[in-house]
Amino acid sequence: MVPQLLGISSSSAEIWIYILASILLRLCVSLGPYSGKGKSPMYGDYEAQRHWQEITFNLPIQDWYTNSSLNDLQYWGLDYPPLTAYHSYVCGWLASKIDMDWVKLGDSRGIESNQHKLFMRITVLVADFIIFYTAVFAISRICKRDDKTTNNGRALLLLGVFYPGLVLIDHGHFQYNCISLGFMLWMVFCFERDSDVLGSVAFCLALNYKQMELYHALPVFFFLLGKALSRPWDKCILKLAQLGITVILSFVILWLPFLSSFESITQVVGRLFPFNRGLFEDKVANVWCSISPVIKIKKLFDQTNILRLCSCSTLLLSLPSCLHLMFHPNVKALKLSLVNVSLMFFLFSYQVHEKSILISAVSAILICEKLSPYLVVWFLHMTTFSMSPLLTKDGLMMQQYTSSVLFLFITMLCFWHHNHVRLNKQGKFHNVAHGLISKQLITPRTPLQMSIICTYLLGIISILTKPPEKYPDIFPVLISIFSCAAFLLSAACFHV
């Protein structure tokens, strides 16, 4: 009633409620601790982001990735592509206008004042809204246009803005994943509009903000290759040349300050791909970490052979999805391939971080229109749960479980409501069929429901119970194994 009195459609009012509620969720999470809070001398990701602002603001651009007395790369040296560095410079410049002490070279290390925390939190929120929110909204509008009931667009918007994994990592732990993932979503939007050149530019921006977007490189390549090969040969060659020039120009523009010498290029590339760091970070929920209690890959093979094992297994398992996409180069197949291939990279590739699962998670939001949204919600919940050891280390347990419960409640309630509305307009057979599905979803008898209950039980036990002295990491390992099993099951479902 109120929206009509204000001259606002109920659909628009509902969207604004979602957006405002999700922003409130981000603000509440941001009130909590962050990575490395009070843990000198290295602190954590919060200090890493601040330090990059300090370095980029004070040093010449050619010195950003180079070790020196003024830029100790052992202390959170820049290890993301140039677009991240440029963004850090902009944030550093803004910080200097408020308080120069925040970016004072050398003397600003470990600064944790309330004013600076507020500034840093605002920079994430602004980036989130400008790039990620707008991309989610744009894609949801396309889904709404293609779906007369608007359910797909609403589901995508809900999943996008309330997904707790991204909220907790960006606004709790502290990172800017919303930027690279937002550019990825803009890429999909452009491909939906058949704007392959703009889509290629958007992907170059995503890749040059975080190199982990390489998880999406194969699907994008095979999608564009398939579209080109479906044309006559003359138009195919022209299309490939157009896309190739677009990618090359995008990289040249973004990397221009570092193209002065071969040494400068190798210095940046070496920072982006440090192969000496190891097979995986901490207790990540991928295959190599999950089997490590039984099979010690690091002891069986040297680093070179481990790299080969990871590369071959990842590429081999990604190939079916890529080949299918090349022979069926449509956007729906692209969305599925983005999820499948990124999940294979997370499960089997080399040097995987816990937070890399966000790439697969945000990609999965795109396929809620193709698969059951309940399956996608379950997968998103499991991705958040897989990061429990990291979030526990940051002191974000309360935020994690609160936002996860809220996410499940809001999405399930919304999907049930709109299914109920749609069922009232359909025949008896549809009512019976969907009624059975709804009944399964509200009773804890299905495997998906039971697995969600298990995540909360395992999480509570890990918090309240002291691990045995012989196995101090038993709970993080169990969480990783359980999550990895869920991801393997999800990969099987997404491939069918």
Image: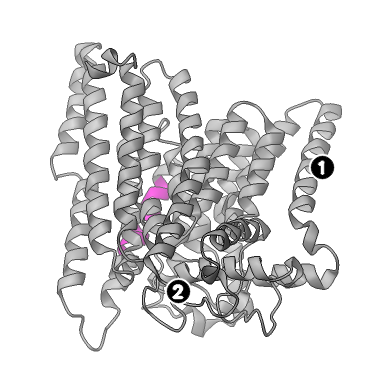
Q: Is 257 positioned to the left or the right of 291 in the image?
A: right
Residue for badge 2: 111
* Kind of residue sitting beneath label 1: Ile
Q: Are marks 2 and 1 in contact (CB under 8 Å)?
A: no
Residue displayed at 27% across by 77% down? 474
* Residue in the foreground of this view, choosing between 100 and 431: 100
Q: Which mark is residue 245?
A: 1
How many numbered discs, if any? 2
Residue displayed at 31% across by 44% down? 24
Residue displayed at 19% across by 37% down? 441
Q: Disc 2 to disc 1, how far (Cα)?
A: 44 Å
- Can the viewer see residue 46? yes
Q: Which mark is residue 155?
A: none
User: Upstream in the sequence, badge 2 or badge 1?
Assistant: 2
Which residue range is magenta in the image? Answer: 482-492
For residue 369, what is the image quadrant? top left
Q: Is 432 positioned to the left or the right of 104 in the image?
A: left
The answer to whether 267 is drawn above or below residue 489 in the figure is below
Image location (x, y in percent) of residue 195 = 67, 29
Q: Is residue 416 magenta?
A: no
- Can the viewer see residue 340? no
For residue 209, what is the image quadrant? bottom right
